[in-house]
Amino acid sequence: MKISIFGTGYVGLVTGSCLADVGHDVICVDINQAKIDGLKQGIIPIYEPGLDSVVKSNVAQGNLRFTTSAQEAVQHGEVIFIAVGTPPDEDGSADLQYVMAVGKTIGELMQSYKVVVNKSTVPVGTADKVTAVISQALEGRGFNAEFDVVSNPEFLKEGAAVADFMRPDRIVIGTSSAFAEGVMREVYAPFNRNHEKIIVMDVRSSELTKYAANCMLATKISFMNEMANIAERVGADIENVRRGIGSDPRIGYHFIYAGCGYGGSCFPKDVQALARTAGQYGYDSKILNAVEAVNDKQKTKLFELICKHYGITGTDTSALKGKTFALWGLAFKPNTDDMREAPSRVLMEALWAAGATVKAYDPEAMDETQRIYGNRADLVLCGTKEAALNAADALIICTEWKNFRAPDFTVIKESVADQVLFDGRNLFDPAQVYRNGLAYYAIGRADSI
Ligand code: UGA
């Protein structure tokens, strides 16, 4: 099938290249000329395992092309995906200006029937708005053409997006048009071979499904962080509690890891946006507001543990002035270079405000950190995790990259002057760390308070 994708960000690029990979004829369009020039030369603007080779091989085969010409893209696609950004605006609602601009462009340029697919995460009611803007543009031209606007949310995880797209748990399609449903079934037929994964529903339910999924996962995490905060006060260990409750299949083991807070481009934004949507409909969502508040607080947890260790009780943090902290893990989670809403940022900014220096290492996010913070005397970017330890006073772990899981504790002990480890991801058995002669602070563990 001929498919066009507006937006070559993370969602658009993964969607476009994976659809090309199963044989569809795909054009990706973006207004950013430099990005498109780079993609034509095989330069992938984001780090996502496996994406590089899917893009390159399909470009080589000719079934994945990149352009800045909206005209070319609209003409090409029988199905047109909108996969542009929906950043939060000042009050936390999703900003729809880019989605609406693409809708308008499609209406201005289309010459025949199109299925327009909302792939961006958009508030309930957006498909109706996109329908209206396309109709208006068509009217403005005095041109009559039919189209359907379908909701088809993405459920890709950063770091596993290509695999998630190729082997989806479910493919949600929101439409009340039997014809558009048939077209969408054809688009996804190659991913729907072994058992039925397509779930068709009305547009608004589909739009809400996306938010409900992310908000449910964020709720699980904030709930566990809340339990962790209770656990450390009552002398329990959240890791035992996690195993204890996860064994109940109604609860399950996934997404119940306490930590230094969730980040990324999805959970924080989507929890906020759904709370705002609820508010616009006159409903005060106590749960969503609490999920957000608990997470904001949890991102300060590591700094609180550091203050505790150094005997800081009030607002006077001068005990940290001149200290150097080795920091392992900057990305909001492993297998990505994404620093959006990363807990590491809240931590580093608190340490800097207290006059401390950070020696940071991350397997992928070094360039991104440099881009965000530039050159500053209190940030030293290190090429290896060992280099970060050099001349540091303490070690902090913010992201659970695989190669942080079995460190040489002797090296850590010999390198960090204050012989203390702050672990925001509960990677170790406390007894093991103590055996190695280090003080250990983690999340929701009685021993660490
Ligand atoms: C999330 C969802 O998991 C995807 O299904 C969804 O498609 C995507 O958002 C999206 O809307 O685009 P992602 O943001 O890539 O994916 O990352 P996750 O793997 O969900 O992790 C989110 C955050 O939660 C990370 O900071 C992670 O460290 C944290 N987390 C996760 C915990 O603190 N504890 C857990 O048990 C699990």
Image (cartoon, rainbow, N blue to C red):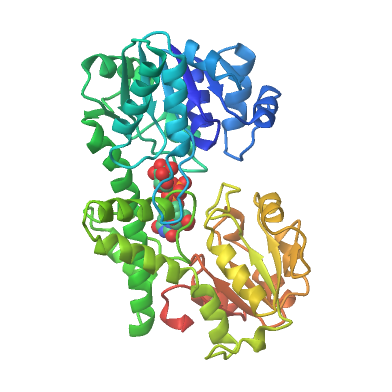
Q: Nearer the viewer, residue 308 or 39?
A: 39
Q: Nearer the viewer, residue 69 or 213?
A: 69
Residue 169 quadrant: top left
Q: Residue at x 26, y 53 (%)?
A: 278
* Image location (x, y in percent) of residue 109: 47, 15
Vertical side of 170 occupied by 141: above or below: above
* Image location (x, y in percent) of residue 118: 38, 30
Q: Residue at x 40, y 61 (%)?
A: 257
Vertical side of 125 occupied by 66: above or below: above
Q: Nearer the viewer, residue 111 or 172?
A: 111
Residue 119 quadrant: top left
Vertical side of 52 occupied by 325: above or below: below
Q: Could one spot residue 272 in this view of the protein?
A: yes
Q: Residue at x 75, y 60 (%)?
A: 382
Q: Residue at x 57, y 31 (%)?
A: 51
* Image location (x, y in percent) of residue 356: 69, 77
Q: Could one spot residue 242 in this view of the protein?
A: no
* Image location (x, y in percent) of residue 249: 23, 53
> For the N terminus, which image quadrant?
top left
Residue 176 quadrant: top left
